[in-house]
């Protein structure tokens, strides 16, 4: 009976939800601080972690039985709860019975060999004609290196014990122990400068060429000692250069020559020209391995040094070898009892397919004029005995054959070879996908099935809506609060922010009509990432980065862009470069910022008396700030880096880097340039001539007030673009729409309009007491219609961005923010009968839009990487970001309910009225969290389908997907609180709905900027936590304590319905 209570207990299940969530959260920070391997060892692939998941599934099955979820009125709950059992079974098959690896093929070659993703301790034993291999899966780490295991070969035991493990090992030449002769060879290759060490009597390969020390070889470069002198014999001719006086000596192949120390050798070989230097000659010492990185995964080019003890037939020997991810090499064989050769290794193993793939052709398509790939695909032939068939494999286009799935994952730098991710996980995928389908069906039906809790909550909410109570005192309370927030007299600083900065002469000095500048703004330009867009777009983007506004005084972005290319000297004198106020008075004084925190370029340079050249006044500050760890940078450092970036952009404008408006004729990559060819930094004669003619016509037009010739020059450039790049130009309609999109700046405008109308919903009950019902209803409908128009404008803005960019508008931080704000307003319409929902959701949407247009996010439209070009991505991201809207709404409603508890304790006369609203908002809160949880869960697993179709792995414990699962666990706990007797309280439920939003904030913002992973924007740079987070937590703590004691003291807490 006691066991039954444990396995059928909702309390235990809820505890396991939290335990699993906390474990995964800790794991993500372990991964950030140490490595992915450490996180897998101690959490993700540990036995205790799997036991937690198993207990959750057992409790889930027990609760299905306990609550008889198979009954008709609960049948949808039965479906989606049962689905997690299928997903768990799928996970078991994927974890223990599948394999995955990488296959690499060069053009014209065949292959059936896969390199495993998993790492193994590998043994090879050879005796006579008998050779055996032993592979034991294991993850070696600094914190997990106590490996010891026994194997058997012909009834003889073989013991392996790992003695030492050095991650990302680098060879160190120690002269303290003079054990053997060693020569150090420094060479240059594609990876840069490398150090190589060659022992006496050994050979090694450097840049594809064999070197030997005191050992004869038939082909290569021999270094040997004779009569206390060092000689060289090479199979290649070349020359050596004295690195001090630059004197040159010539070498002839297959002849003996004195080895010249500290001379640069250059030799022409079959592998190209190689360069190498021997700096010290032959010395005595010992080679040792040392750790060369902080984290084990910081340097993927370096292997790990492993020392193992091998004991076999009463003999024990130590061996040190290199191993690691994707390494298939083994150590040199050790001889035991004169007859047994034993090799050991660590890393990947080879897996062999029952068929071959031949790569016929690999094809890469870059975005025009850039090195950024738009797509890449492999044309292959599958050869299975007598069967031959051609296939095409590309991103999101998978080859499935005999249970093996091939995914396009990468390619060789020269574009002549391809890399496939390969897996065999039929049962894991089958059960997981079956679970996803059942889960989605069950969750969808739950929202509409008669008899489910969600259906009953809808009916109860209708009954509560019929009780129309006025809470005028509450609105008056809000009026007081809002007066302080929005209606207080402006301080001197606030008024000061809206004053015009003193550069009025700019408008008088620039004589470029708007009509002409708009014509120039319609010209097309190619950015550094290959996107073709109107000049108007790049002008606005650059001006926002430098000036933080869309115009300089009355000069719009088009006029500014023309003017700065016409007379850049003039713009060095104008204070229009934004300086960050947070840098402090020391920073502002140093850059000579004006009252509006703007500086001119000329004020940022001084004449260096030593070199008689201009010097950037922040150069030392920049170098010091740049060298600091990001978490150690203060506001002064950040301000220095920001203004340095803006100065850098200005210099690039002066160099013509952003006016790539001239297509290079017959260029295979459709590259455009300005008057300078960016790759070679040489003059583009035709571009220079055409742009120079335009500048001349511009000067003529300004003097003669006749713009016809200048307009004609623009038309010539436009016709030139059509002639040489017609196939890649966007349509006229798309150009017009993008310019209109830039001009309207719809999402920025909506951020303020939403704030106004969100605030209006707080006030409308107040007007109910002063206007007749007919007039009140009339104005209410008008404002509701206006809000609907704004919502529809928001929708049109999203559609426009989709059409302009060519992809769904939720692929980066800015786009997801504007989409979540759209969902929030939509949720307001969904619950429009309750103004406590509609008003706050619209207002939160406005805040989110304001954040999106702050410094943290970039509204620039960019091209997509190939893996993101998937319909699964569109559905996955849209579903998840929509769920965020419901969670934010639930969090706000929870805060609102706690506020009502405080009011109820202080306004006893209205306690009944307030209680009705508490119950209303709690029901809406639970409905919002339920819908949000369903959407987040479905969206997360849709992401798994996308990942599985894109790179062959539907779950990889990436921090983003892990935190999505953490959020699912936390909100599942919150929604199951009502089944725990000690926590079945309206107060506790609403309080938990506030706290749980922190997991969503971490999933949305934290992972992107603080953790490393596939979804990361900051790639795990250790950024400092903003101070407002600590203030918010402190305020929430005080507010919650006040609300709790108000509720407890007046005994007004109420249990939430089961």
Image: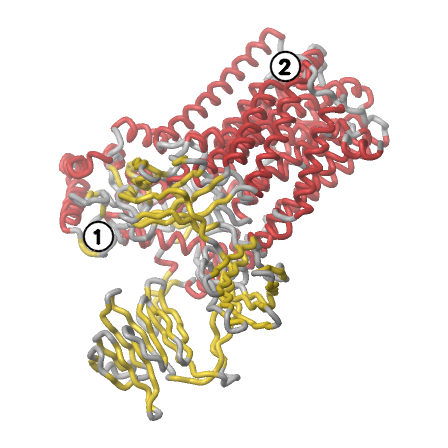
Give percent across and percent down for residue 468.
Answer: 70, 12
Q: Earlier in the sequence, mark 2 or mark 1?
A: 2
Q: Which residue is at 56% across, 61% downward?
A: 153
Q: Is residue 505 above or below residue 519?
A: below
The image quadrant where one finds the N terminus is top right
| Position of residue 405 in the picture relative to residue 832 (left or right) | left
- Between the residue at mark 2 and the residue at mark 1, the CA separation in whole angstroms equals 67 Å
Q: Is residue 346 above or below residue 11?
A: below
Which residue is denoted by mark 1 in the rendering? 676
Which type of secondary structure does the marked residue at label 2 adopt?
A: loop
Give percent across and percent down for residue 146.
Answer: 64, 62
Q: Which residue is at 26% across, 64% downward?
A: 271
Name which quarter of the figure residue 465 lies in: top right
Can residue 56 be seen in this snapshot?
yes
| Position of residue 506 in the picture relative to residue 760 (left or right) | left
Closer-to-camera residue (90/936)? 90
Closer-to-camera residue (381/240)? 381
Give percent across and percent down for residue 929.
Answer: 64, 27
The image quadrant where one finds the C terminus is top right
Q: Which residue is at 58% across, 20% downward?
A: 444
Closer-to-camera residue (783/1028)? 1028
Which residue is denoted by mark 2 in the rendering? 449
| Position of residue 397 in the picture relative to residue 379 (left or right) | right
Q: Are marks 2 and 1 in contact (CB under 8 Å)?
A: no
Q: Which residue is at 35% across, 80% downward?
A: 215
Q: Is residue 380 above or below residue 913?
A: below
């Amino acid at each position: 009976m006691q066991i039954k209570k444990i396995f059928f207990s909702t309390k235990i299940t809820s505890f396991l939800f939290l335990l699993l969530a906390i474990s995964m959260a800790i794991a993500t920070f372990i991964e950030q601080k140490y490595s992915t391997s450490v996180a897998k060892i101690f959490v993700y692939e540990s036995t205790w972690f799997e036991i937690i998941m198993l207990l959750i599934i057992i409790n889930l099955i027990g609760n299905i039985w306990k609550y008889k979820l198979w009954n008709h009125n609960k049948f949808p709950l039965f479906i989606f709860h049962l689905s997690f059992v299928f997903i768990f079974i799928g996970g078991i098959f994927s974890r223990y019975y599948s394999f995955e690896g990488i296959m690499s093929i060069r053009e014209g070659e065949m292959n059936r060999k896969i390199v495993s993703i998993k790492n193994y301790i590998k043994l090879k034993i050879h005796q006579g004609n008998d050779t055996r291999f032993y592979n034991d899966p294991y993850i070696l780490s600094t914190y997990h290196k106590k490996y010891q295991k026994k194997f058997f070969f012909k009834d003889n035991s073989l013991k392996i014990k790992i003695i030492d493990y050095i991650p990302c090992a680098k060879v160190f030449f120690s002269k303290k122990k003079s054990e053997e002769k060693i020569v150090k060879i420094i060479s240059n290759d594609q990876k840069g400068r490398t150090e190589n060490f060659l022992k006496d009597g050994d050979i090694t390969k450097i840049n594809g060429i064999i070197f030997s020390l005191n050992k004869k070889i038939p082909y290569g470069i021999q270094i040997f000692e004779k009569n206390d002198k060092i000689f060289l014999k090479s199979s290649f001719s070349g020359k050596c250069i004295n690195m001090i006086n630059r004197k040159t000596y010539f070498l002839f192949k297959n002849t003996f020559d004195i080895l010249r120390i500290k001379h640069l050798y250059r030799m022409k070989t079959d592998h190209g020209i190689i360069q190498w230097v021997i700096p010290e000659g032959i010395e005595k010492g010992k080679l040792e391995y040392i750790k060369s990185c902080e984290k084990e995964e910081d340097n993927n080019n370096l292997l790990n040094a492993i020392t193992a003890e091998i004991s076999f037939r009463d003999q024990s020997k130590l061996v040190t070898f290199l191993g690691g991810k994707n390494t298939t090499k083994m150590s040199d064989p050790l001889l035991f009892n004169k007859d047994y050769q034993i090799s050991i290794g660590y890393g990947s193993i080879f897996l062999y397919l029952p068929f071959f793939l031949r790569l016929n052709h690999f094809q890469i398509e870059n975005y025009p004029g850039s090195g950024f790939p738009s797509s890449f695909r492999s044309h292959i032939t599958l050869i299975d005995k007598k069967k031959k068939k051609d296939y095409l494999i590309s991103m999101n286009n998978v080859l499935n054959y005999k249970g093996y799935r091939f995914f396009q994952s990468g390619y060789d730098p020269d574009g002549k070879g391809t890399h496939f991710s390969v897996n065999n996980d039929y049962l894991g995928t089958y059960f997981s996908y079956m679970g996803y389908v059942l889960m989605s069906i069950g969750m969808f039906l739950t929202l509409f099935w008669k008899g489910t809790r969600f259906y009953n909550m809808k009916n109860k909410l209708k009954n509560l809506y019929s009780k129309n109570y006025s809470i005028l005192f509450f609105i008056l309370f809000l009026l007081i609060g809002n007066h302080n927030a929005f209606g207080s007299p402006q301080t001197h600083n606030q008024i000061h922010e809206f004053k015009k900065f003193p550069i009025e002469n700019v408008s008088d000095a620039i004589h470029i009509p708007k009509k002409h500048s708009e014509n120039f703004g319609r010209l097309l330009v190619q950015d550094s990432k290959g996107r073709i867009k109107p000049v108007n777009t790049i002008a606005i983007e650059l001006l926002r980065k430098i000036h933080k506004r869309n115009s300089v005084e009355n000069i719009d972005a088009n006029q500014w862009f023309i003017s700065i290319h016409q007379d850049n000297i003039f713009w060095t004198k104008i204070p229009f470069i934004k300086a960050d106020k947070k840098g402090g008075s020391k920073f502002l004084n140093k850059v000579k910022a004006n009252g509006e925190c703007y500086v001119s370029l000329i004020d940022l340079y001084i004449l260096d008396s030593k070199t008689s050249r201009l010097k950037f006044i922040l150069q030392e500050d920049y170098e010091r700030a740049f060298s600091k760890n990001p978490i150690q940078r203060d506001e002064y450092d950040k301000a220095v880096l920001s203004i340095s970036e803006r100065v850098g952009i200005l210099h690039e404008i002066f160099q013509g880097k952003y006016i790539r408006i001239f297509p290079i004729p017959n260029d295979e990559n459709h590259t455009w340039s300005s008057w300078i060819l960016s790759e070679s930094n040489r003059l583009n004669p035709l571009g220079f001539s055409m742009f120079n003619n335009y500048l001349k016509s511009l000067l003529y037009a300004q003097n003669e007030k006749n713009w016809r010739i200048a307009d004609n020059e623009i038309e010539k450039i436009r016709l030139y673009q059509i002639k040489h790049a017609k196939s890649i130009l966007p349509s006229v309609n798309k150009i017009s729409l993008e310019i209109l999109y830039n001009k309207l700046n719809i999402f920025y405008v909506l951020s303020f309009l939403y704030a106004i109308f969100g605030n209006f919903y707080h006030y409308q009950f107040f007007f109910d007491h002063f206007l007749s019902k007919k007039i009140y209803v009339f104005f209410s409908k008008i404002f509701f219609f206006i809000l609907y128009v704004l919502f529809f404008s928001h929708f049109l803005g999203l559609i426009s961005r989709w059409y302009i960019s060519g992809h769904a508008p939720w692929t980066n931080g800015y786009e997801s923010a504007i989409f979540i704000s759209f969902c929030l307003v939509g949720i307001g319409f969904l619950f429009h009968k309750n103004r406590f929902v509609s008003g706050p959701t619209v207002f939160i949407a406005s805040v989110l839009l304001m954040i999106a247009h702050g410094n943290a996010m970039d509204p620039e439209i960019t091209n997509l990487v190939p893996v993101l070009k998937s319909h699964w991505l569109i559905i996955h991201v849209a579903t998840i970001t929509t769920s965020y809207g419901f969670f934010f709404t639930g969090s706000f409603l929870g805060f609102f309910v706690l506020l009502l508890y405080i009011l109820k304790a202080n306004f006893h006369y209205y306690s009944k009225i307030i209680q009705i609203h508490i119950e209303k908002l709690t029901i809406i809160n639970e409905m919002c969290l339920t819908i949000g949880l369903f959407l987040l869960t479905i969206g997360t697993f849709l992401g798994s389908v996308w990942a599985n179709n894109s790179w062959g792995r539907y779950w990889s414990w990436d921090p983003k997907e892990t935190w999505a699962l953490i959020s699912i666990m936390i909100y599942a706990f919150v929604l199951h609180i009502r089944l725990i007797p000690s926590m079945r309280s309206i107060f506790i439920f609403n309080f938990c709905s506030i706290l749980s939003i922190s997991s969503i904030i971490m999933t949305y913002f934290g992972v992107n900027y603080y953790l490393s992973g596939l979804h990361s924007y900051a790639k795990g740079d250790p950024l400092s936590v903003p101070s407002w987070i600590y203030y918010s937590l402190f305020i929430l703590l005080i507010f919650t304590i006040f609300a709790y004691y108000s509720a407890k003291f007046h005994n007004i807490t109420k249990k939430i319905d089961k």
